[in-house]
Amino acid sequence: MILPVTLTAAGAAALINLWLAIRVGQKRKSEQVSVGDGGKEPLIARMRAQANFIEYTPIVLILFAVIELASGTSLTLWITMAVFLMGRVAHPFGMDGWMPGRMIGTLTTFAIMLGLAIYAIAIPYMAPAHVVPTEMLLQG
């Protein structure tokens, strides 16, 4: 089964992560720090922006995948994915000093993760009951 929302989100997330890594590399060069952060606040901010992306994105991608697998592709899921990725792009600009970006990134990430988590938990309870043949119960 192809999961278009999840595949698109995963591909876009990989590109965003690459962009974040390049930004860290650029700051390393300008701050003349090859290993670690050298105590340089601008470099620390860029490193934290990438780390923050890595901390939240995998679980959100997993939630997209299981929801799409369980309930199918929907316009709502596409929009949710787009908003999540836009928030994840705004966040590093906030870490560079544009504070609305950091807040936008944080709030969209938390709200979307919470919404997806609640929906993922609810899906099995909203689905119609399936009758399991007796022979399957005896085998399992």
Image (cartoon, rainbow, N blue to C red):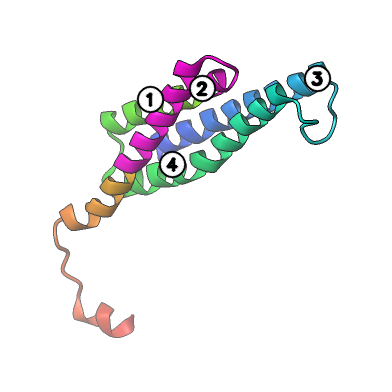
Residue drawn at 28 percent across, 53 percent down: 121
- Horizontal and vertical percent position of residue 26: 75, 19
Q: Which residue is mark 2?
A: 89
- Relative placement, left or right, of 15 versus 91 is right
Packing grade of label 1 (10 A; few <14, some 14-19, many >=20) is some
Residue 127 visible in the shown view = no
Three-letter code, disc 2: Val
Q: Which residue is mark 3?
A: 31
State yes or no: discs 4 and 3 in contact (Cβ < 8 Å): no
State yes or no: discs 2 and 1 in contact (Cβ < 8 Å): no
Q: Nearer the viewer, residue 42 or 10?
A: 42
Q: Secondary structure at mark 1?
A: helix
- Relative placement, left or right, of 26 versus 116 is right
Residue drawn at 44 percent across, 47 percent down: 62
Q: Nearer the viewer, residue 109 or 43?
A: 43
Quadrant location of the C terminus in the rendered image: bottom left
Q: Secondary structure at mark 4?
A: helix
4 vs 3, front mark? 3
State yes or no: discs 3 and 1 in contact (Cβ < 8 Å): no
Q: Which residue is mark 4?
A: 60
